[in-house]
Amino acid sequence: MDIFAYIKRDHRKVAGMMDDVMSIRLPAIRQNIFHKIRSELIAHSKAEEQTFYVAVEAAASESVRLQMAHSVDEHQDIADCLTVLDNTPISSEFWIEKFGELKQAVTHHVHEEENDVFPKARVLLTPAQARQLAADMDRLKQQFLEDMEFEIPAL
Ligand SMILES: [Fe+2]
Ligand SMILES: [Fe+2]
């Protein structure tokens, strides 16, 4: 698997989890899935920045580097949204509204990444690099997920 397939698989997984949250009414179960989504999004974004984005930026022109900086800003917006959700009662109207915003922000970011960043990155990275980056990103992501397990209160 190369980095493009790896990232896409992650994107589909989190999209499915976000759909699940909206259909679940029991607060404890919703909280549980939300924590999984939060961990997935944070681990994915951080690992992606430190492997895929670094490799693309190293090979890219100034305009592509600017686009990567924009993508990093979107990761930050998503992280900020997760913090607000974390500090809001999960059964409140505001939580639902804010979760809708998160979903929209993630969908927009994923669309840009796959449709604007990927075509440029495919030109810049060799197939061997793309395969190596998938392994690197996966290792780093698992590490971030393990680190976060200790921060999230068990339900
Ligand atoms: Fe991504
Ligand atoms: Fe991303």
Image (cartoon, rainbow, N blue to C red):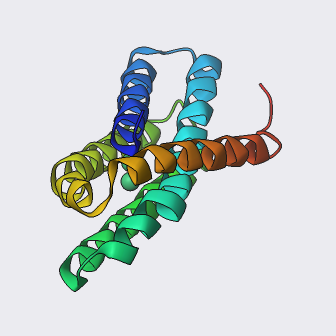
- The image shows residue 32, relative to residue 25, as above or below, that is below
Q: Is residue 106 left or right of residue 40?
A: left
Q: Residue at x 16, y 49 (%)?
A: 115
In this orientation, which residue lies closer to the viewer: 93 or 21? 21
Residue 15 figure quarter: top left
Expressed as whole percent of the image width and height from the top left, the position of residue 106 reads 33, 46
The answer to whether residue 92 is above or below residue 79 is above
Q: Identify which residue is drawn at 26% across, 63% down.
A: 124
Q: Residue at x 33, y 65 (%)?
A: 71
Q: Residue at x 32, y 70 (%)?
A: 68
Q: Is residue 85 at least partly visible in the picture?
A: no
Which is nearer the eye, 67 or 100? 67
Whole-percent x, y for residue 109 in the image: 28, 52
In this view, the residue in front, 52 or 125, is 125
Q: Is residue 155 above or below residue 79?
A: above
Left or right of 66, for residue 155: right
Q: Check the picture and name the quadrant holding the C terminus.
A: top right
Instruction: Please state the total of marks drawn on the protein image.
Output: 0
Q: Is residue 74 visible?
A: yes
Q: Is residue 9 left or right of residue 61?
A: right
Report the quarter where the N terminus lies.
top left
Residue 91 spot, x, y in % from top left:
53, 30
Q: Residue furthest bottom?
A: 62
Q: Position of residue 22 (x, y in %)?
A: 39, 23
